[in-house]
Image (cartoon, helix red, strand yellow):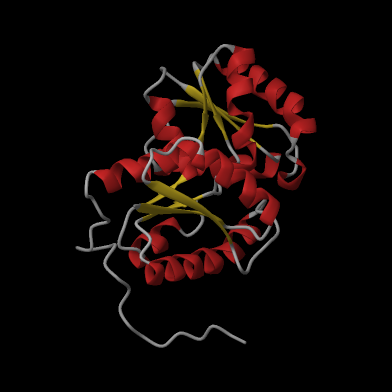
């Protein structure tokens, strides 16, 4: 039995439940997916400040998972907060949803557009595309201007129209949904627009599952070796 923890870096339980449902729907028999809500941090992640405050919660979840013998992890926030630090701390593979979604989209067409939540988060998505070497595939980043915690069935039409505009504006073949809270909208938006729509939660979950199945773990030679032991002040 393989265990994958899908870590929601914010503290909103309802969002974790939705993420977990989407991840469980795609894994193979013999893989157990558990959604983990961060114990500390912001209720949603919509700024650099929020992202910085989310990282300690992600690392705390990784630490718990390592003690529990978890095989691999998904970081279910499109900013991929704490990804490199999590790879230092975990034995098994750790994949961020932005990383996985962009890589999956690059296999499906000549170019993709990212549709994220707020306008202020567009720069972060652009930075990640550059960081992951996806800049030649990423034709544009767009915002639907729906806050993370307002993403539900009532916002589906707004997100869909933002995706439609992105495809038409950029001439893209694929859409990447730029928030874990959009995961459940993936199929319906794809059917309406007639183009592949990639959700990073499922893409990252299947990436982790594949790496585990191949018997692969994060290399502990060099940069992703365990952090050198030292005293840390964590506050009270």
Residue drawn at (48%, 37%) of the image: 202
- Count of marks placed on residues: 0
Left or right: residue 10 versus residue 4 is right
Is any atom of residue 130 visible in this view? no
Is any atom of residue 229 visible in this view? yes
Left or right: residue 34 versus residue 108 is right
Residue drawn at (71%, 45%) of the image: 148
Front in this rendered view, residue 37 or 21: 21
The picture quadrant where one finds residue 151 is top right
Height in image: 228 above or below 145? below
Residue drawn at (64%, 42%) of the image: 181
Residue 203 position, x and y percent, is 44, 36
Q: Determine the residue located farthest toward the right in the rendered image.
A: 154
- Where is the C terminus found, in terms of image quarters? bottom right
Residue 83 position, x and y percent, is 43, 56
The picture quadrant where one finds residue 85 is bottom left
Residue 216 position, x and y percent, is 23, 50
Front in this rendered view, residue 182 or 130: 182
Front in this rendered view, residue 35 or 112: 35
Front in this rendered view, residue 89 or 172: 89
Residue drawn at (51%, 86%) of the image: 233
Height in image: 36 above or below 140? below
The picture quadrant where one finds residue 123 is top right
Residue 104 position, x and y percent, is 40, 30
Height in image: 196 above or below 183? above
Q: Determine the residue located farthest toward the left in the rendered image.
A: 221
Left or right: residue 155 versus residue 210 is right
């Amino acid at each position: 039995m393989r265990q994958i923890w899908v870590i929601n870096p914010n503290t909103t339980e309802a969002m974790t439940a939705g993420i977990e449902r989407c991840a469980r729907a795609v894994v193979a028999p013999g893989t157990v997916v558990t959604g983990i809500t961060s114990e500390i941090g912001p209720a949603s992640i919509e700024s650099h400040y929020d992202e910085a405050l989310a990282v300690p919660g992600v690392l705390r979840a990784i630490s718990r998972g390592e003690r529990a013998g978890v095989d691999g992890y998904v970081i279910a926030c499109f900013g991929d907060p704490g990804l490199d630090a999590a790879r230092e701390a975990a034995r098994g593979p750790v994949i961020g949803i932005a990383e996985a979604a962009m890589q999956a989209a690059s296999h499906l067409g000549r170019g993709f557009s990212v549709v994220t939540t707020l306008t202020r988060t567009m720069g972060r998505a652009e930075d990640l595309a550059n960081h992951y070497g996806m800049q030649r595939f990423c034709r544009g980043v767009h915002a639907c201007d729906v806050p993370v915690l307002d993403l539900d069935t009532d916002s589906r039409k707004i997100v869909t129209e933002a995706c439609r505009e992105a495809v038409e504006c950029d001439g893209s073949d694929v859409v990447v949904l730029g928030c874990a809270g959009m995961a459940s909208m993936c199929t319906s938006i794809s059917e309406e627009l007639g183009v592949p729509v990639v959700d990073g939660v499922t893409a990252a979950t299947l990436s982790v599952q594949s790496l585990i199945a191949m018997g692969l773990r994060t290399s502990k030679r060099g940069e992703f070796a365990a952090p050198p032991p030292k005293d840390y002040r964590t506050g009270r």
